[in-house]
Image: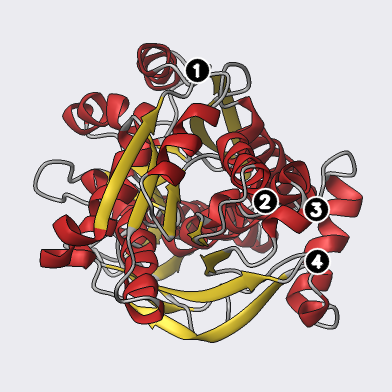
Amino acid sequence: MALRTSGGSGVLRFVRSGSTLAGALLAAIVAWTALVDTAQAADKRYGPGASDTEIRIGQTVPFSGPASSFAIVARTEAAYMQMINAKGGINGRKIDLIQADDAFSPPRAVEQTRKLVESDGVLAIAGTVGTPSNLAIAKYLNTAKVPQILAMSGSAALDNAALYPWTSPFYAPQVVEGRIAARYILNAKPDAKLAILFQNDEFGKGYLNAFKAELGSKADSMIVKEEPYDLASPTIDSQIVSLKASGADAFFQATTPKFTAQAIRKAHEIGWKPLHVILATSSQPSTTLKSAGLEASTGIVTSIWRKLPGNPEWDNDAAMKDYFAFMAQWAPKEDPEDPTALLGYIWSQMLVEVLHRCGDELTRENLLKQATNVHDLQMPMFLPGIKINITPESRTPWHSAQIVSFDGKDWMRTGGIITVPAKN
């Protein structure tokens, strides 16, 4: 019995020959399996770095250099991918997360990113840490049409679909957090005399510009003093003395953890007690605030979008229990209460979500599509009511945060969720 197909219908028909029935059946099974395999293969589409067995993703991280404290985010991500791979990967594919040290140097970030794309052949660059590095690599990746997704930067400059169609950030948005800080001060102390300390780069200026945008026409009259500092500066004591001397009674810091702690400590030492607002990324009690002094930190305000590890409010929360269990098993050397560790955990969940949505179409085009089409996604470790919404036109991932104040031990929620537009 021989095997044939009838026209283009795909229907199997048997034609009698001298073969045995068993042989004919075996031939039919083999042929049908081949047809099924061909059909399944046709349903799968792969870009560079993707196959039936793996998905290669690249990122650069400051494992060394002045921002090396952020490397914990990458270590947590690597641990999360190990967990996912141990459970079988995503749709049967293991994630190969290739991490390169950029030392928080934009030229080094470009060099390492080119290697990841051109030598390592990654499907995408995802989760590169820091605004300077992400801005430095954006032009190259967009020209090469390589997705730059879930970028660890809140810079509004990266939410520009016309200029950077292949780029989408995933971080506490500067434009949102800066405007929420200003709105809080306008409500709590509308006649405030404002002092501002900011990091003199894209990181600090992003928050500063958003803060001023929300103040609007009141910015010129309310801001009495601004002081910049460089990331490589050993101390900002002189800036704090200058800001106090301005007569300011409200203080906004657009600063990274090291300088946040220095400013809080110095303000306390010289007896300056303004209405004090800091960034969420620099608000961890067990690290930044402990370094500054818990007494000195009491009364400080920030805005948060995530649940707070170690805060009694979340002791019985199922998602929090899952997070601590993960950290204990897969990242036991890391501090689970460090906000950057939690950020790495949340980022990893988002990457897995996007890759799952890609299904068997693991092309660069579909990966970008899935990363920029997210509607009302409630992440397990986000505060209830704060959801991710990303469109091809607006890629700022969330637009809300909760105001909290430090009581000397922990952050306490002191009001409702504030929502601001993603763009001016």
Q: Is residue 85 above or below residue 295?
A: above
> Which residue is labeled 1 in the image?
232
The answer to whether the residue labelled 3 contacts the one labelled 4, judged by CB atoms less than 8 Å apart, is no
| Badge 3 element | loop
Alpha-carbon span between mark 2 and mark 1: 40 Å
Amino acid type of disc 2? Gly
- State the separation of the CA atoms marked 3 and 2: 24 Å
Tally of numbered tags: 4
Mark 3 or 1: in front is: 1
Question: Of the residues shown, which amino acid type is indicated by label 4?
Answer: Lys
Q: Nearer the viewer, residue 282 or 298?
A: 298
The amino acid marked with disc number 3 is Pro
Residue of label 3: 336
Left or right: 102 as drawn, with respect to 376: right
- Check if mark 3's residue and mark 1's residue have beta carbons within 8 Å: no
Q: Position of residue 237 (x, y in %)?
A: 55, 30
210 and 272: which one is in front?
Answer: 272
Determine whether the residue tagged by mark 1 lies in a helix, strand or loop.
loop
Tell me if mark 4 has few (under 14), some (14-19) or many (20+) residues whose alpha carbon lies within 10 angstroms of its own. some
Whichever of labels 4 and 2 marks the residue nearer the N terminus, that label is: 2
In the rendered structure, the answer to whether residue 278 lies left or right of residue 219 reads right
- Residue holding disc 4: 409
- Secondary structure category for the residue under label 4: loop
Secondary structure category for the residue under label 2 = loop
* Mark before the other along the chain sequence, 4 or 1: 1
Residue 106 in the image: state x and y as whole percent.
37, 18
Q: Mark on residue 89?
A: 2
Residue 420, x across and y down, in percent: 29, 75
Counting residues from the start of the chain, the first of labels 3 and 4 encountered is 3
Q: Give the alpha-carbon distance from disc 3 to disc 1, as whole Å.
A: 27 Å
Residue placed at 36% from the left, 69% from the top?
180
State yes or no: discs 4 and 2 in contact (Cβ < 8 Å).
no
